[in-house]
Image (spheres, rainbow, N blue to C red):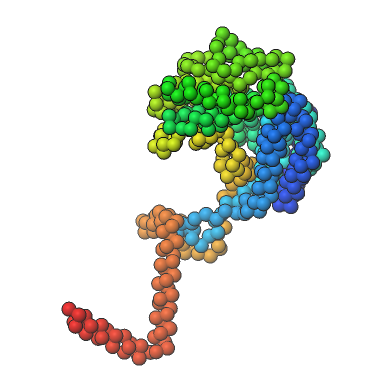
Amino acid sequence: MTDANKIVKELRQTFSTGCTLPVEWRLHQLSKIMKMLTECQQEIEDALVKDLHRPKNEAMFFEVIFARKEALDAIISLKEWMEPEKVDRGLLNIMDDCFIKPEPLGVVLIMGAWNYPFQLCILPLIGAIAAGNCAVVKPSELAPHSAEVITRILRNYLDSDCIKVYNGGISETQELLQERFDHIFYTGSSRVGKIIMKSAAEHLTPVTLELGGKCPAYIDDDCNLQNVANRILWGKTVNCGQICIAPDYVMCSKELQGPFVEKLIEAFEMFYSDSIHETKDYGRIIHKKHFQHLKELLENRKPAFGGEFCEESLLITPTILTDITPDDPLMQEEIFGPILPIMTVENEDEAIQYIKHGEKPLSLYVFSNNKETVNKFLSQTTSGGVCINDVIVHGGLATLPFGGVGQSGMGSYHGKFTFETFSHKKAVMWKSMGMENVNSLRYPPYSDEKCQLFTWFVLMRPGLAKKFLMALLVLLVALILSFIFMKVYGPSYGSLLHHWNIADNDFSRNKF
């Protein structure tokens, strides 16, 4: 028995006891996550400095506060999320109790990524726990200091019978993927995503794949260029550009390219008034292999700005490249670094056509004050998400689903969407033992009359069925009231109606 097999077997035995089902257990674990993130914040920040030279503010916001907000939202909303969801009923089921009951999937696997090692493990885990699952968390081995802290704090704070941490490299991951899970949640590259999906297919395991791709940013001529430059440069330098929703390249008119580069340089000087080599506000590349890959992309080029390297510290300064063409190597795959190519286009239509002919991106950014232009992008392109006049920040709103489409991923999460990702929506119909006259329409012996009546019942739309039932109820009440009046007033009630009728006829004759 392998370590992976042993862990999964133990979790299945634990899940079968039903200990993760009560709302009290879920809320307690979520509260422990809140406590863990608060008490271990310094450890988290220190690990991120060692792995990525992560600025303190970025570490605090993207890894700690964001996760705390997700946990807090789950604590506040969990009872509401767990409530059965009533559904509309047709006339045939108008007397039945019909609802959707969310239930946990079982034992799930969460595979984090190195670029945001804490957030990308803890956010899915919050949803998995909220939904009542047992989970295996696999941190990325490429951020070893973060993986060590994740392992320790999860074991110290959470229920170790229900939440397990599994560490290792490629061979350990392959061993883990041989096991049967009830859901696999993976964040990382498309290449590895395909491997995950193949392994999951062996067990018919559903997957959520949070991948990436080339996220375009289009700039219209009517924008405030300094504001645009500030936002795009920030998005391209957060975590040294190593974020799946960073703007990968820019498209703008030929006339706008020069002024935009000038504004980018102004933004750079504003952000990093100290030396870029000395500042603590700028991160580093994760490891030498990725550093060399990015360096090779810049060989034999003349950047409009930047392009400095320091292999010892894995530093690559923010770099701007102009007049890039569609066939350039920079435009063939996700850059995942602080390199910003600018490609000129005639107008928004050319930009849209270029986007449509490529793979569907995880995010699309449009900078424009023209609603018609924005709506063109919204209606004529497909992407995981769209942010108008800014970058990245849409991923921080938990009421919006975060996820890709096509090559950029499948499935979504954040907030309630994570709870739903790790839940099975069980369909429930609770019928009465009565109403057998209606049920008899489906019993033999069959007849044309039964078929016609049954068809009428089935085809009645849910909304109309409710109105039809209300109309019957009103009619029934009217008949009952009429019966009561006749019983109480007897013949005098009929005489009163006769006098009202005569008076009404006289009024009509006088009027006309």
Residue 401 position, x and y percent, is 56, 40
Total numbered labels placed on residues in the image:
0
Nearest to the observer: residue 488 or residue 118: 118
Residue shown at the point (35%, 88%) measured from the top left = 493
> Does residue 157 appear left or right of residue 366 in this picture?
right
Given residues 116 and 199, the one toward you in this image is: 116
Q: Residue furthest left?
A: 512
Q: Quadrant of the N terminus?
A: top right
Q: Please tell me whether residue 382 is drawn above or below residue 299 in the rendered image.
A: below
In front: 64, or 480? 64
Q: Quadrant of the C terminus?
A: bottom left
Q: Is 452 placed above or below 321 here?
A: below
| 52 left or right of 193 in image | right
Q: Is residue 485 left or right of residue 74?
A: left
Q: Is residue 270 above or below residue 124?
A: above
Residue at x 39% of width, y 37% of height: 372
Please state the horizontal and vertical placement of residue 52, each as a whole percent of the image. 71, 25
Residue plotted at (61% across, 45% down): 416
Q: Is residue 376 above or below residue 279?
A: below
Residue 244 showing in the rendered view:
no
- Identity of the residue furthest to the bottom in this view: 492
Q: Residue at x 28, y 88 (%)?
A: 499
Task: Find residue 300 and report its image quarter.
Answer: top right
Position in image of residue 296 (x %, y %): 61, 12
Image location of residue 50, percent across then percent down: 76, 25
Q: Quadrant of residue 256?
A: top left
Is residue 419 visible from the viewing direction of this image? yes
